[in-house]
Every structure is written in structure tokens, then in C-alpha cells.
Image (cartoon, rainbow, N blue to C red):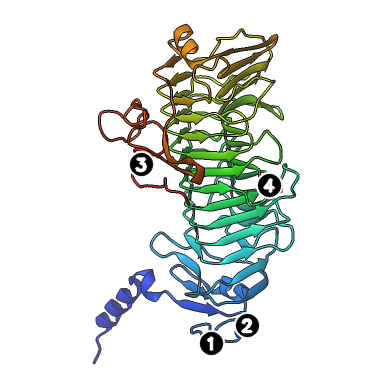
Amino acid sequence: MIRRGMVAVAAFALLTLPVSARAATYFVDASRGDDANSGATAAEAWKTLAKANKAVAPGDTVTVRQGVYAGSVIAPEKSGTADARITYAAYEGELPEVTGGESGSIVNLRDKSYVTVQGLKIHSPTEHDWTVNLSGAACTNNRIVNCDVSDPEGYVCITIADGASYNEVVGCTVHDTGHADEQSGDCIVMNSGAHHNTIARNKCYNGCHSQIMALKGSHSNIIIDNECYSTDPEWAGAGINLPLGADNTVVYGNRIHDLGFITDQKCAIQIDSARNSIHHNMIYNVGAFGISPQSYEFRGTAQSSEGNVIANNTIYRTGRQGLFFVSKGESFSKANRILNNIIVAGDSTWYDKSARIMVFDTYHLAKPVTPGAWFDNVFKNNVFFHESAGESDMVLYSFKTGTKSWSMSELEKEFPGTFAGNLEADPRFVDAARGVFVLERESPALGAGMDAGLPFEGKAPDIGAAGNRPRDVNEGR
């Protein structure tokens, strides 16, 4: 005989089992499945993702078999939990393609949390607004992992927006978006208050406007160890762009190259925001500028590049200036610290001056200033390499009534509070022609930096991006 109390205890134990103990694995197969099946095995797979979207609960996994899921969308009706994520994953060794979508998206996780999408090809043959949509204040802790995402006729491949937070885009290939007119097409965008999201170890290429961008109050995000480039000069937009309140963002260990050829204004990294940490990035073969702090009014909103730390970056032979500071109207690029960077001059000219290391542009300020008004920016312990040592127009200052230029040694003598400890020397890379910017043993940049608040070994950090990293991302790819 079973006592009533024993039944109650057994029922209570069943109710309190972890969600993962009751988690299910479902199968979807576009070629051989049927939505009338149970979905519980590969032989009983469903045909559509729509069926899976309705069925999944916290802890469940949807295994997606090879095939083209046309007119489909990944949009679970429920969220997962911290202990029981919902996962959509490609079957091992296969690359299913999800295409079509609805309401402007193919993956729609608006206001959903703890969902993983992994190993899928997500492709739009027609125009979409946001191919992968992570948006809304309740959109948190989602992961897009090892996916191939493209949208050749669209605007943004992956968007994290409207207060979405703690989401991750990791190990993805995100590419080919825009209209080749330079005004549309971004691979990954954090927009409208998105915060504490991580963009890591992705390959982003052929974004016509930019490869990665944060804007409109999107703050405290991490952009780390991505490769940003183009394979087509017609789609070679900017690298990483931080306008309109993209404050307190870390841009770290990214490799940015072969960009900026649509116009001569595209930057590898553009900073129109405050208190960001831009460090250990490698920039080369960029048609326009390397790193550019910019301050101006955009559509009625003032934005200023202020209080940023730009440290331990390597900028090699950009088409225009390695550093380009811009102040316009009543907005000033100010109080930025430029420390421990290597900047090697490019081969082009600007205003018929070979100011190939840096331009400090105040021409469009509402109230004119005179050369030498540096707005509390400081330039310390950098290596500047010009093809001519002591070149008198290494740094050019543009202002209302003309231009003025200096060599670095002249600047250090005239403005010692702004320029100090900078070297004019060949940094001596192992093989810059192949994109290997590791320093030779005899490099003057070894141990010649200053403490910028970043990890380093020895008595002082190396200058440039090659040293002082917790892991090596410096070899050519």
C-alpha cells in the first residue's frame, strides 16, 4: 500500500526537479520533416521552424538539419532562463540556411532572453531592416554564436537595440550589407541605449557604411578581437564607429584593414563619444584615416570626443592621416590621452602638405582658435615614423586662416605639457608587408611606453599593439 503522504512527497519532488531534467531536444528537417511528426528524433523531425517556435520551453534545444528554410523565422514564443537556455543549433557537421523571415527579420528575439542561436547560415535574398534582431529592454543574455549572417540588399545584419543588454555575438562571419552608396549597410550595430553587450571574435566584412557601430546612447559595450575588412572596394566602409553617446565602450584587440575606399573619409576607428578605451588595435591598408576623435553637431545633437584613452594601437600607412582630430561648431575633441601608440606615415598628402602622422582640424569651429590650442589632449610615449626624420610638417594644424605644421621634436619643445616622451624612429616590425606587426628584438618600442592603466610586463609596457596582451592576436591571418 502506498501512503497518501508518500504520494505527496513524490509529487513535490517531481515539481522541484531542475528544468534541465525535463528539457527536450527537437529536430527540424526542411527536406524530410513533417509538422505532424513528434519532432522528438531525427526520423520524426518537424518540417518548419514555426512549429519549433511554438513548442520550445526553457531548457529545450532545436536541432536544425541541413537544408534551406525559406520564408522562415527563428522567433521562440517563450524566453529561456539563466539555468535553462533555449537553443537553436545546427546539426553537427551541417550548415542549414534560414532565409526569408518576416517583419524585417529572420531571427527575431525582441524582448526575449537566454536564447542561443548557433551554427546557422542566416541569409536574406531580399531587403531586411535587421536580419538578426536583438532589441527591447527585456532582450538580455542572448547569444549568436558561429553563425554566417548576410543581407546584401539590407541595412543591418545584426542589431542590438532599444535597451537590449548583456547579449553576445561571438565567432560569427557577418558580411555583405548595404547599397554601395556609403550611407547604408552595417554588419553589427548597437543602437538606442543598448548596453553591456559583447561583440567578440567575429569576422565583419563588406559593410558598406561600417563593420561595427554603437550609437544613440549605447554604452558600456565591449568590442574585442574582431577582424574588420573588405573584399570589395565598392563596399569598403568604415571599421568601428562610436558616435552619439556610445560612451564607456572598450574597443580592444581588433584587426582593421583594407577599408575606406568608397570615399576618402572613412576611418578605421571613429570616436564621437566619451570615456572609451581604444587599445591594442591593429590598423593597416585603410584608405582614409586610422583613428579619428571627432566632435560636431549631427542633426541637432551635439557629440564630443572627450576623455577617451587611445593606447597601444598600431596604425600602419593609412591613405591619409594616422590620427585625425576634428572639432566643429561649438563641439571640441578634448581631454583625450594618446599613449603608447605606433603610427607609421602613409604615402598620400592632404592640402598639399605631407602631414602624414596627424592633423588637428579646428577649421570649422564657431569661434576661431590659434595653432597650439590643444584642448587638454595629451600625446605621450608614442612612436611616430615618417619617411623623413624630423619632418617639419609631420603634424599639421588646420585653422580658420590657414595651416601650421611642426615636427614632433618641435612640438615637444614648444608644448611640453601636451607632447612628451614621443619617439621619431622606425618601430622595426617583424614583417609589416604581411601584416605581422610583432616587434623585433632591437625595436625602440620595446619597454618604452608609459603606464596607461593596461596590463603589462616588466618595468614599462611596450609601445604599439603587439605587446602586453593576455593572448597573442598579432600573427598575420
Location of mark 4 (residue): 233
Q: Nearer the viewer, residue 45 or 240?
A: 240
Task: Determine the residue positioned at 69% across, 20% down.
Answer: 352
Give the SS element for disc 1: loop
Near mark 4 (Cα within 10 A), the count class, few <14, some 14-19 or many ≥20, is some
Label 3 sits on what residue type? Arg
Q: Nearer the viewer, residue 89 or 436?
A: 436
Location of mark 2 (residue): 31
Label 2 sits on what residue type? Ser
Cα distance between the residues tagged 2 and 4: 38 Å
Cα distance between the residues tagged 3 and 2: 47 Å
Q: Compared with residue 33, is residue 342 higher up or lower down, i.e. above or below?
A: above
Location of mark 3 (residue): 469
* Residue 219 in view of the camera: yes
Q: Earlier in the sequence, mark 3 or mark 2?
A: 2
Give the SS element for disc 3: loop
Give the SS element for disc 2: loop
Instruction: Please give the count of numbered marks on the rendered protein.
Output: 4
Location of mark 1 (residue): 44
| Labels 3, 2: front one | 3
